[in-house]
Amino acid sequence: MRARGYTLLEILIAVLVLALGIIGGVALQLGALRARHQSVLLSQATQLAATLAERMHANPAQAATYLTLDYDALAEPLPSAPSSLCHGGACDAAQLAFADLYDVKLLAKQNLPGGRVLICRDAGLWSGGTLRWDCVGGAGAPLVVKVGWRGKRPDGTPWLDADGRHPPGVAIAVGAPP
């Protein structure tokens, strides 16, 4: 005579298979959330760099002022405001450049975790196949806007380059006249 119904072993195996499926689905969902977050950060960094590049194109006489920007949100959590923010009032080209730099610092602080923005002359933008914070170039090298944040790998460890620093996420060559 054959026994009818399910044995305890069959039920346990079915529950185990179901649990593994649920764990796999949750892992996929977490991976998708991480990828979405990284793409949002990359999009915000790209918009910030493009906005700054456009502002530099609009005010080319102040290239030297823009080249002073090396902002790190962790080192300077509350950027100091310039004398004039140029919102609705008249200001000269230098005041406009300082207002632009202040706006960019605020955007980096608000939108990027541990954000950093650097403007420099860099002839070796992709040295070694990866973006670097170091700038290699003299007066003839193109102006470059580099934007990054302190990201993490999927396992939670910091995302660091070979030098042990957080690499830039975006770099845009401005090409403004020197």
Image (tube, rainbow, N blue to C red):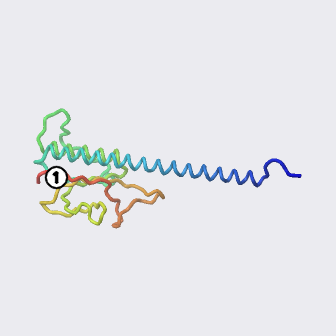
Dot 1 alpha-carbon crowd within 10 angstroms: few under 14, some 14 to 19, many 20 or more = some
Q: Quadrant of residue 9?
A: bottom right
Residue located farthest toward the front when viewing the structure as drawn? 1
Side of 137 where 164 appears, left or right: right
Residue at 38% over, 48% down: 39
| Left or right for 103, reference 57 | right
- Percent across and percent down for residue 138 are 14, 63
Residue plotted at (24% across, 60% down): 125
Judge from the rendering whether residue 10 lies leftward or rightward of residue 113; answer left or right.
right
Quarter of the image that includes the C terminus: bottom left
Tell me the residue at 65%/50% (across/down).
18
Q: Is 11 on the left-hand or right-hand side of 125?
A: right
Give the tally of numbered discs.
Answer: 1
Picture layout, residue 125 above or below residue 76 = below
Tell me the kind of residue under disc 1: Gly
Residue 61, x across and y down, in percent: 10, 48
* Residue 35 spot, x, y in % from top left: 43, 50
Q: Which of the two residues, 2 or 29, is positioned nearer the viewer here?
A: 2
Q: Quadrant of residue 93?
A: top left
Q: What is the residue that sits farthest to the right in this orientation?
A: 1
Circle 1 is placed at which residue position?
175
Give the SS element for disc 1.
loop
| Residue 120 x, y percent position in the rendering | 20, 57
